[in-house]
Amino acid sequence: MAATETLAELKDAAKPHLEMEPERPQLLVGVATCANAAGARKTRAKLVEALEAAGLTDEVDLVQVGCVGACSREPLVEVRTPGEAPRMYVEVDEERAVEIVEQDLSGGKPIVAWLIDEGERIGEPAPHQTMARPGEINLFTRDWQNVGFFERQFRIALRNVGRIDPESIDDYLSVGGYAALAKMLDEMTSDDVIEVVTGSKLRGRGGAGFPTGMKWRFTAAEEETPKYIVCNADEGDPGAFMDRSTLEGDPHSVIEAMVIGGFAIGAERGYVYVRAEYPLAIRRLEKAIEEARERGILGENVLGTDFSFDVSLRLGAGAFVCGEETALIASMEGKRGMPRPRPPYPSQSGLWGKPTCINNVETLANIAPIILNGPEWFASIGTEESKGTKVFALAGNVNNTGLIEVPMGITLREIIFDLGAGIPGGREFKAAQTGGPSGGCLSQEYLDTPIDYDSLREAGAIMGSGGLIVMDDASCMVDIAKFFLTFTQDESCGRCTPCREGTRRMLEVLERISVGEGEERDFERLERLCNACTRASLCGLGQTAANPVISTLQHFRDEYVAHIDDRVCPAHICRALLHYEIAPDPCVGCGLCKRVCPVQCISGEPREPHVIDIDACTSCGACYEACKFDAIVRA
Amino acid sequence: MLYEREALDTPEWWQGLDEMIERQHEQYPESVQTALIPLLHYVQNAFGYVPEKAINHIAQALGVPTAYVCGVASFYSYFSLEPKGAFTISVCLGTACFVRGAQAILDEFCRQLDVEAGGTTSDRIFTVSDSSRCLGACGQAPVVMIDDDVHAKVVAQDVADIVAEYEARARREMQAREERARADARSHVQ
């Protein structure tokens, strides 16, 4: 029997938690790490309770889904009733949960003020299946294509995240999951698969942007066996959570792609190397693997064909450098996660010395749609050299924080001001940081740069894995550079001298500058250290560790000058450069500052102006925060 | 939880570890070392840290030098060679949390608990982690993770309440444990 027929049988037997065309009301609760932090577990428990109280337990389906990406509005609850456009409620705490059940589900009156689209689509019929791509069915496109925060997004990698129950293989099957795998097993040779992936011009989403098809071709060409395919889910960049969300929201999309990749390169075993810091992602992956084995999708004779493939998990243990492929291999082998010089590349000699192909989570999540829709379709999205879409974790000082998937070539301005809805608190945009500790800070003048691998590199940043941190004018760029250097210095594995010593010396210089002990020569020192670290380090960590320094020096040099020449921190962040004083006029002598001061350096009689003893003051700012009369002056 | 963890050091537990080593050997015949990191996870999950006894045990079972196991365990920030408090407070210092003021929150925890980052309080209730990496909940920044609970959008003023909440929980558990011990003693007498 052909694989497509086996799959059709599986699909017929499937009992998905989420019906495509629901015959009765459904409640979708986003349950992911970020949603849980916002209290989604409590919301869910309350919904169960409220449904019971309303006598609706047997009439409404309550389904958990992954994170749809609107993190700043979590917890999110989506109501789908037959024949009507879906309604997404935001910031659903326990109180709102009860109201939603009582007013909307029981009473039939949606609560407009709490809806993400503010009730724009109430009364409209359920959206039709208009755009079938990128999978057979694209629920995201169908339900939310033209609504607010989702408007400019185009979802390929995240097509099912937040739309299906990630802990149910039946849900994945019902939205066309594993169809790409079946199609490939029936119709394609391994060469065909590589041809398609190469033709799509998909580039690695982990940061470096190496063409995926070429990587597969190199590994396929090796004669030695066994070969391995490894999914790199060691998402270490601070401020990046694309991979976590994908694994928590749609783990099967990654597993399906690993089977496809395994077939293409001639591997029978795949490993997912996942961070130990992501317990929920680990649990959902384990469940997904187990269910895929039960259905005959993993293990001997995949979908009844003579191809066999299995996947298992390997846990990281908190080392950023393990995201580098040779360090990752060392860690999987039970060694200290230290990189080694390349060549030989892992495609020649990787895990246990065997040919190994290592792909990032997001890269893999793009594979199934490419197989189903063809390389021309994928290559029609994006820019000349960067095809498809990119998932960004939008965070920092921006109104709509969350996860977005946008076509390559979109500008920073569109992301930050359209999707992100600008900077909170009426502050000014100062910088956008892409690529985590390996990337750079881009200033205002780069807001209209199209985002793709090459333009970002030219601008002095990198695409990286997709962290995008927005900073407002209250951020100090010297402090930010110091923050990243503290990180890389700490995470440097210590193997090669330029990185081990270079990051430490750069950090020392930055620390001196931030306490007002910088000197004119520090510019030259930093530049020399940056150069050495970039050019002489062994792996990507050291080669890019200087980027935050280089880019802030380039785009925000005046801030360094202010710290060094004038001994001031213009953003009022660097504590040692701050001075606090009490202005006698507005001070009413309430004594609040005196009480909060941790070093008791404020004195004064009640109802008389107080005074700060400058010599004892540690510039902690507690009094500044506490004063209700704006009497504390910061300079 | 520490209070349950201490009770783990039993012959049965160590036998369980040996069985796990056996399974790892079967799963990864390619190389004995491959089992090392999963084993360290297993130990760390049970005890909250990796005790010397476990390091020696694993080294012997895998036939590698103790120094090698130590070297690997100390390389990864997830493993701790020191005992920890009942609760580990991890203030996320990822970029998103940092730009939203996470450092001030970490400082506040340290100040209120009178420990340095990385230290454990003298009553062994709290450890303030100094190596928390991005927890990936950037949309809720700044976040604080205490064991498996994630607290979102924390401000310095919340710190006192958070500390009090967990102190109370620790007290309750300690009390329950003492009562159990007393009940055990009574049944023994009878």
Image (cartoon, coloured by chain):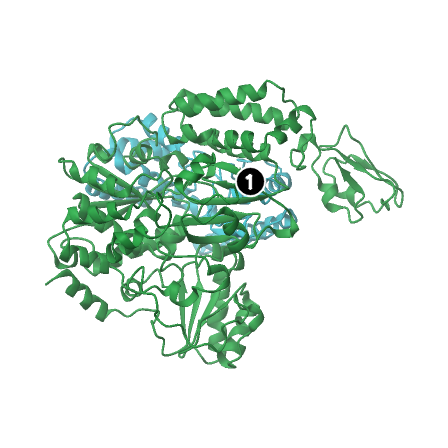
Chain colours: A green, B cyan
Q: Which residue is mark 1?
A: A445
In the rendered view, would you say B164 is above or below A77? above
Residue A184, placed above or below residue A484:
below
The answer to whether residue A77 of the structure is visible from this angle is yes
Q: Is residue A106 left or right of residue A298?
A: right
Foreground pick, B124 / A326:
A326
Q: Is residue B83 visible?
A: no
Q: Is residue A169 left or right of residue B48?
A: left
Q: How many marks?
A: 1
Q: Residue at x 37, y 72 (%)?
A: A128
On the rendered structure, is A47 left or right of A520? left
- Number of other residues with Cα within 10 Å of mark 1, as a class: few under 14, some 14 to 19, many 20 or more: few
Q: Residue at x 45, y 53 (%)?
A: A403
Direction top: furthest residue:
A521
Rendered view: B65 above or below A370: above
Position of residue A397 measured from the top left corner of the image (x, y, whole percent): 57, 47
Percent x, y of residue A156: 35, 55
Q: Position of residue A104 (x, y in %)?
A: 51, 77
Residue A597 falls in image quadrant:
top right
| Residue B18: % across, % down | 27, 41
Q: Where A363 falls versus A181 (above or below)?
A: above
Quarter of the image with the N terminus of chain A in it = bottom left
The chain containing the residue under callout 1 comes to A
Q: Amino acid at mark 1?
A: Glu
**Image quarter for residue B79?**
top left
- State which quarter of the image contains the C terminus of chain A: top right
Badge 1 marks a residue whose secondary structure is helix
- Foreground: A141 or A546? A141
Which residue lies most toward the front here? A384
